[in-house]
Image: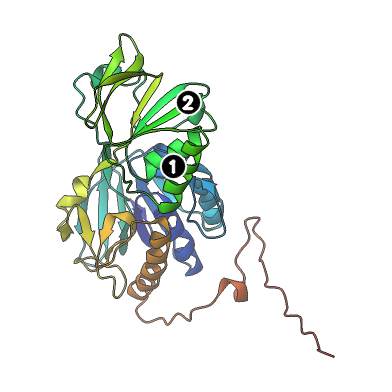
Amino acid sequence: MIKTDILIIGAGPTGLFTVFEAGLLKLKCHLIDALPQPGGQCSEIYPKKPIFDIPAYPEILAGDLTDKLMEQIKQFEPGFTLGERADTIEKQEDGSFIVTTNKGTKHQAPVVAIAGGLGSFEPRKPPIPNIANFEDKGVEYMIREPELYRDKDVVIAGGGDSALDWSIFLADVASSVTLIHRRNEFRGALDSVDKVQELKDAGKINLITPAEVKGIAGEDKVTGVIVAPKDKEQFTLACDHFIPLFGLAPKLGPIANWGLEIEKNAIKVNNALDYQTNIPGVYAIGDVNTYPGKLKLILCGFHEATLMCQSAFQRIFPDKKYVMKYTTVGGVTGFDGTKKEAPKAVVKKIE
């Protein structure tokens, strides 16, 4: 039996940052994740994808963000159960919970924080009859290693952030990048849309809208895609890789059977207080939860984790009063084991 103060389901960015906030409160954490390494989607799906909305980082690769978070929490020595899925939860007489994985590993904690991101997920595949024949033969539903596309002709389909971001990124890697979308309008960030337009004007991205990919050409591997522009004749566009980026179909998996209140495949929480679910002691933070005004951003997950840890402290130690302190005042144990003291204020007299 693995015992801890906060048991975190999911080792993505939100789950990892929870360890830091809990550590400031002297609470120990243990994380469970079905993936074989920490980082969630940032490590498994798009480690080389740039992220632009992390404070103090104008741009950081998803994999590097994971590395930084792991460095930040190293001082608090969290435990990990990786490559195992949290399957069942049982409430004990003392109010704690026992969570058992699909491999039988048992964990006990007074607080459970579900930070499972989108849950288990599968890419949404376009309805192209022969697409399955070319999977891993030039058809990829996610980009793990951009160098695979070095000096190749790449076709990307989609109209969201991933399609836009990867089109921008691969413009400096691939021999050619063609972005195809069934509408003239895009769903992604306006800055990304503007950047794609700039690259199109500069001749670095070929943009075909409104249009759809209806078929794939080739025998043993992709040699082209069949493009169907609206109100025009179909044609074959030569390429080495076809990357349809239509998002992921999320599934909560066994967590959906835990008695939690679910709305549109997300866990409902009380965002007015502490992101607790309908089961006292079980919280949901990050992309896995929902509430009025919810934004699925890593930044929002960090905020939710911070407030959740404050509530968890009060639940674990109801008779203790915690006085909020800023890390710049008290310092935080350094990564090398030393205490980082805040610098003394400098007062300058105005003559």
Between 322 and 238, the one lying in front of the other is 238
User: How far apart, in angstroms, are the residues tagged by discs 2 and 1?
Assistant: 15 Å
Q: On residue 85, which mark appears?
A: none
Q: Secondary structure under badge 2?
A: strand
Q: Residue 234: x percent and y percent?
A: 25, 21
Q: On residue 176, which mark appears?
A: 2
Residue plotted at (56% across, 57% down):
75
Residue plotted at (38% across, 51% down):
31
Residue plotted at (41% across, 53% down):
190
Q: Give the crowd class for mark 2: few <14, some 14-19, many >=20 residues within 10 Å.
A: many
Q: Secondary structure under badge 1?
A: helix
Question: With 246 as the anchor, is 172 left or right in this view?
Answer: right
Question: With 75 as the anchor, is 305 left or right in this view?
Answer: left
Q: Amino acid at mark 1?
A: Asp
The image quadrant of residue 154 is top left
Residue at which label 1 appears: 165
Residue plotted at (53% across, 29% down):
173
Q: Residue 275: x percent and y percent?
A: 30, 67
Residue 240 visible: yes
Choose mark 2 or mark 1, whichever is in front: 2
Against 37, residue 25 (above or below) is: below
Q: Residue 194: x percent and y percent?
A: 45, 48
Against 123, residue 28 (above or below) is: below
Question: Is the Cβ of the residue at disc 2 closer than 8 Å to that at disc 1?
Answer: no
Between 134 and 91, the one lying in front of the other is 134
Between 220 and 317, the one lying in front of the other is 220
> Which residue extends farthest right?
351
Q: Give the crowd class for mark 1: few <14, some 14-19, many >=20 residues within 10 Å.
A: some
Q: Earlier in the sequence, mark 2 or mark 1?
A: 1
Q: Amino acid at mark 2?
A: Ser
Q: Residue 23: x percent and y percent?
A: 49, 64
